Image (cartoon, helix red, strand yellow):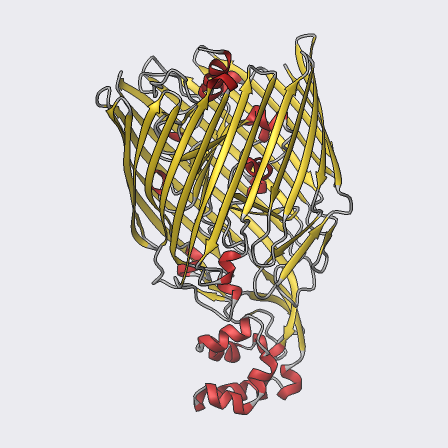
Amino acid sequence: MNAFARHALSVACVSLCLSGQPAGAQQDPLDEQDTTAYNYPVVITPTRLKQSIADVPGSVTIITGDTMRRYGIQNIPDALRLVPGMAVTHVSGNDDRINYHGTDVVAPRRMNVLVDGMAAYGTTLSRVDWSALPVALEDIERIEVSRGPDSAAYGPNSMMAVINIITREPRDVGNALVSVGLGSHRAGDGTVRLGTRLGEGTHVTLTADTSRNSGYDNLSVPGGDRDSSFIRRGSLRSRTTIDSHNSLELLGSHVQGVKQVATAGDPNQQSYPDITQRSSNLAGRWTTTLSASHELQVRALAMSSSTRQDWRTCTWAFMLNQDVVDVVNNHPELAAAVSHGGDARTLLLTNSQLAALLSPAEVTRLLGALAAMGGTQGALQNTCGLTNNNMDESRSQIELQDTLVVNDRLRLVTGAGLRRQSATSDTLFTGTVNSTVRWLYGNGEYRALPSLTLNAGGYYESNSLSGNSFSPRAAANYHFSDSQTIRLVYSKGSRSPDALEVRGNWAPTVDQITPPLQGTITSARTFALLRGNPGLVEERNTSLELGHVLALRNWGMVIDSRVFKDRLTDLITNYSTYYQLTPNNDTSLKLAGAETQVNWDQGGDWSGWLHYAYLVNYAASNQVEQTQWSRHSGGVGVSRRINDHWLAALSTVHSSAEGFRQSRYGRTDLTVTHQLRLDGKDIATSLTASYMHTPTITTYMGWQSGSVQSSYNDRLGLYAKVRVGF
């Protein structure tokens, strides 16, 4: 085995966990044994089985923690720019819109995100809060990105791709780490991590970190300089080896932060709708080895979160009159026009228009309301109060997973799970929405021939909100030699409608009304902004992929390429784009293209990566599905270890701009790192210089908001960081 092969195998196998769950699982007989002489990297995300990349049913990108440090990457969204075909739009300092292959930039929500195998994807509003993920950057061992539908392994919401953020095992983090970073735009971060062993079998890690960023210098919205964020995280991880057959892993985390927000999309807001949020997670995994070929895992998770966002708003008095609101809400076309920017004053106060839209009884009711408000003058009185988008969420789940090696040709992973979740918001739901989700899954790997690996699997889910779904996958990997594999993959992915889309009743309440309506009323509910549709079905993606993996061992290089075609149907495109009060499944589109990624390492002195994606977005029935689309995107990075103390890395990423009102992106980073060991401490000091080829970013934000331009005053940014390990 040459030097590169040894290095590739060690990078791939460190801190891998069984079945995509918390890192730290010990090596066991159930691990995939790479049958090639080349020893490809091993991944776990695509099927929940450890597999060589030559055997997985799809394309996978691996981003190690070492890569992020080497190239000066300071956050997960920037790390994902290293993934072929990943669309990353940094709208503001605390708002990243990320989706594999883009499509709808207004509400990107078709990609699952896991932290140690547990979903960080919010099922209430179908979103990922990238700035407040419950993991510190210093704790990340690696990020695995399964590029393509992976609903067969992780269910609905894994429609386009799955990102699995795998943390470091407690026993491998050392005794202590202190890390401090400072940079342009008042950006900074700090991390303190402690590690210890309790008794003979328990390793514990405690991490606390903070991060802040003042965001862009300019945003083309009122109060556009308000996009800073301040996030604090704390986590406690432990792994206990009970005996030779049993182990227990525990994880507790807490995240809280404040995000400045310039606008909530309310044209009448009188104060800034900043967000304060808190979330807590407690997870556990028990693993028992029943035999050399049979393992059982039980995983449990409990989560709660709280979001507070309120602001002062003003409107006409008649917009808060209960009689007016009731009548308008009974007519969806009228409510949509009023809620999404129609000329409410003319619409409601012109008798001829009212008579054409409403029944005589409703016209009489509106005219009576108008009289009670003192006529037109009273109805048009400017009235102000406090409104909000507050919400509390909770989730608890348990999952049982069985991994079995039937023989030297067949391996199976099967499982079942139950999740209960709840969301409470007076604004979004007029109360509380509860749901229950049950699921079954199974994936198998069969070595039909020494040169042929077959994968098949599926995921069945029963969701009390959106009904039943099933996502299958089948793949064949043919190995021409130890260094060359071709694969053919057929898969279906899906995204379940979320609680807001199905059960939403988005009708904001205005409190502390001044002056009081009709002299006494100080609290009232406005028109509906959205009504859920219980008839929604899941969004679907039918995908076909032809892939090729080539290992050039003399060059220390692995090349993974693929061509694909995706057909997306029953899409729930952003509802606020047009005069639409209730979401529907009316949108479809097709995606096709080619991608390649190259990873290169010559024994540690020189290493690098390269990726390129060509994407065609066509046959879209709604232009919003073409608002995040780059026909060409890619990047290249080269790293050089100069000597025992100095390391330099240069990278550049670029994307074109075929999306509706989308701007191209380009950025080049140079990171120089100095490493030394002093009095038993490992000290690394780095400086990253970033050059923005496109300092101004334009993003389409929906029919009502239009486009937003985000810009920096300077093209050049600097970030310095010091890490001390004990």
Number of marks drawn? 0
Quarter residue 58 falls in? top left
71 relative to 315, above or below: above
Residue 179 x %, y %: 67, 25
Above or below for 67 versus 354: above
Query: What residue occupies the far right of the structure in this picture?
Result: 713
Image quarter where the C terminus lies is top right
Residue 656, can we see it?
Answer: yes
Q: Quadrant of residue 545?
A: top left
Work out whether residue 697 or residue 19 is closer to the camera in this orientation and state it: 697
Name the residue at the top extreme.
679
Give percent across and percent down for residue 580. 48, 69
**Is 386 or 135 nearer to us in this picture?**
135
Tell me residue 567's x, y (percent): 38, 52
Relative placement, left or right, of 335 versus 462 is: right
Residue 21 can be seen in this image: no
In terms of depth relative to the viewer, which is nearer, 512 or 418?
418
Quick check: 364 above or below 345? below
Q: Residue sitting at 57 percent across and 65 percent down?
A: 703
Towards the viewer: 491 or 496: 491
Horizontal and vertical percent position of residue 507: 51, 66
Q: Quadrant of the N terminus?
A: top left
The reply, left or right, for residue 262 in relation to residue 308 is: right
Q: Quadrant of residue 383?
A: bottom right
